[in-house]
Amino acid sequence: MKNEVDQRLVLDAYEKIHEHGKAEQGKHTLEGITAYTDHDGYTVFLEGHNVQMRLEFHNKYHFDYNSERDFDMFMRKLEQISRDYHKPGREDPEETHR
């Protein structure tokens, strides 16, 4: 199966999980999604909802999952984390226009 993903979304969710998630043994977990990198930081791993994702250097990625439902839940959770958590030091563009 081929899945088109917005790699910016994945990296944004990764950063927010890393910033706001619970750290344990080099991994961070937030709202059921665990995020970590390999030893050199070039490969990002995200796991949760029975899905494992690997985002490699040059934006190549690979998913392991058994059902489309799991994949959809995983992607919705990444979108929600990206939307609901803010990076420290960055203003929310929607907040500045109110």
Image (cartoon, helix red, strand yellow):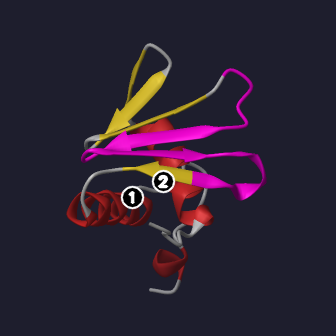
Which label was assigned to residue 78? 1
Q: Quadrant of the C terminus?
A: bottom left
In the current view of this chain or complex, which residue is farthest to the right?
58
Q: Quadrant of the N terminus?
A: bottom left
Q: Which residues are magenta?
A: 39-61
Choose between 48 and 83: the one closer to the eye.
48
- Residue 16: where, in percent of width, then height? 48, 47
- Please state which amino acid type lies under the numbered disc 2: Ala
In the current view of this chain or complex, which residue is farthest to the top?
25
Residue 51, magenta (yes or no): yes
Q: Quadrant of residue 77?
A: bottom left
Apparent side of residue 17 relative to residue 31 in the rendered image (left or right): right
Q: What residue appears at the point 78 percent right and 54 percent down from the top-left corner?
A: 58
Q: How many marks?
A: 2
Q: From the viewer's perspective, is residue 65 above or below residue 91?
A: above
Q: Quadrant of residue 46?
A: top left
Q: Given contact means CB atoms under 8 Å apart, are the residues at marks 1 and 2 in contact?
A: yes
- Residue 57: where, in percent of width, then height? 75, 46
Q: What residue appears at the point 66 percent right and 38 percent down from the top-left corner?
A: 43
Which label was assigned to residue 15? none
